[in-house]
Image: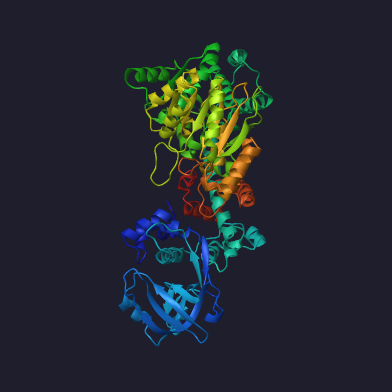
Amino acid sequence: MRPAILFPLFAEIRTLSGVGPKLEKLIAKVAGPRLVDLAFDLPLGVVDRSYRPRLAEAQAGRIATVEVSVLEHRPNRVKAQPYRVLVSDDSSLMELVFFRAHADYLAGILPVGARRVLSGRIERFKDRLQMAHPDYVVAPEEIASFPLHEPVYGLTEGLTARPMAKAVRGAVEKMPALPEWQDPAFVNQRQWDGFNASLLTAHNPVHDSDLEPTTPARQRLAYDELLANQLALLLIRANLRGLRGRAVISTGALKAKAIAALPFALTDPQLQVLAEIEQDMGSEKRMLRLLQGDVGSGKTVVALLAMLGAVEAGLQAALMAPTELLVRQHLASLEPYAKAAGVRLACLTGREKGAGRAETLARLAAGEIDILIGTHALFSDEVTFKDLGLAVVDEQHRFGVHQRMQLQSKGKSADVLVMTATPIPRTLALTAYGDMDVSRITGRPPGRKPVETRVMSADRLDELIGHLRTALDRGQRAYWVCPLVEESEKIDLAAAEERAVMLRQALGLNVGLMHGKMKATDRDAAMAAFKAGETQLLVATTVIEVGVDVPQATIMVVEHAERFGLAQLHQLRGRVGRGSGKSSCILVWHEPLGVTAKARLKTMRETDDGFVIAEEDLRLRGPGEMLGKRQSGLEEFRMANPSAHADLLAVAHDDARLVLARDPDLKSPRGSALRVLLYLFGRDEAVRYLRTG
């Protein structure tokens, strides 16, 4: 149960005075639906109205607050022209400019002969000072009614600054006096105020420097949020670990058969990681391990060998991938080695229907399938294993904590191994996977050559197509990636369908096409044709970003490379360089090229180390966008920035571990305050794992 002290904060925005249905919808779009969301929506900027010059000395372009006399009104004779009001102080004249003006309203707030205090941006036009639409117009005795320093919040179309700021103020005022959940000695050492005082300070910036993540108020709030995150993850972890596991012991006979069938030797990093996994599986505790490995580092082989260990112990294993394409690919690549080991492999996606599906499910429940590969269809209630011993999740960033738990519940005490080819910076790994142990496969498999990366402007497209023609004539295969499927009116991007037509005409070749809006069967057919060499060039959207494996493909062209994130560009580049031939990746950019995009392309040219790229991606984009907000299992923070607050994250991690070691059920005075913290930041799920009392 959420503590009663927090009830006012979890009320809906419409409970604030002045917020009707229309305004509620707009504010919710920006901040969220509840008062707590508004209170956590920190300012992005600050308007300083403390500059009080005489008009003759006013600097153009600055926001100024001036006291003037109203001299005359000059109504617009033509509708398209602005309405002007002439004002002055004892040093100079200034024109106030109003578009779409109501004369009666302006006559009321700016009566001729009256003194008024105005605040707004002063500009110079044809040697005369101007202020268009002053933000404030008040009588001198009312100057206290407008703030000299105003916080600026994120807005959306139809939502203006003043109602947003008023709503945030209303939400912050509803914040009850909360108990102190931090260690007093730690707070004193950092010279931080309490949570409530820090929130007030953060919402009342005076200078731009008050918006920095390093200010004491913002650090305090960030630390509270990070501590809630780390406590929640450790509670979930303790719960999963607390469920009885079982020791999965095998002699390694099946593993040896599969290794003998491999056309290459395992690398030292692969063997090291496999040893870590086998050690976890052999213990009585449940395994919960994240396996990170750069594109093409050989994670899937390691996962197969781990699954064979479970099968040899008389259990079943499951491998879950985010797309049907990846499922089919895993099936094709693992089948020969499963066969060599004498293991029964099957696949289950949304496409399997009717009798075939029913038969697969029946065989699975009867224990006649050893390893099942599938999409999130494996989550559905109808999928029942006889005895699931190991669940492997591929491309972990598509699945959050909830799905991890859901999949694990399929087995009485199944071990879980999650894999990602999107290297995750250490700070984010802690916020998203603090409930897991982490293994890394470093380096590239033997025989893999680095991919030569070039950056090219779009005005050299003809030259690029000429080089491509020469390469394809020599029998090479290439990908051409476009960011959109069909022409968008808003953003003029090279659409995949149009680009495919253009390249067919330019090259005189059969060009394949693959995008997310095609039926799965058509996508598979396009991929199969490319794999078989029936098409030498495949034009695609980012559906090929993850896991597609065609060793014969040696050229990757990414069009509008400036629109892709670093992690995505790195994934796309990883689709080539998978065979023994020399490979290249050409990143084609279009104007205008921003500073961040330029930095991304430079990084791609200079390094192919996924972990270096991930750290740089975090630095350039911030945590929210790292892996695509909506699809990622990554935490979205309101007040913390894991990049800027990395040092605080490490402290929060240690603090959370210490707290739970001393007080696992959070029953001490600090523990009960920490329960309030968990509910405040929406970690209700984690609190459920605490024994009540």
- Name the foreground residue: 64 vs 308: 64
Instruction: Tell me the residue at 57%/64% (across/down).
Output: 208
- Regarding residue 526, the answer to whether it shows in the image is yes
Residue 239 drawn at (x, y percent): 52, 38
- Compared across the picture, whether 14 is left or right of 621 comes to left
- Name the foreground residue: 203 vs 473: 473
Residue 382 drawn at (x, y percent): 37, 26
Count the marks: 0
**Display colour scheme:** rainbow
Residue 543 drawn at (x, y percent): 46, 32
- Is 519 placed above or below 129 here? above
- Compared across the picture, whether 172 is left or right of 273 comes to left
Instruction: Tell me the residue at 38%/33% (across/down).
Output: 517
Instruction: Tell me the residue at 51%/75% (across/down).
Output: 64
- Is 535 placed above or below 99 here? above
- Compared across the picture, whether 384 is left or right of 196 comes to left
Residue 329 drawn at (x, y percent): 49, 22
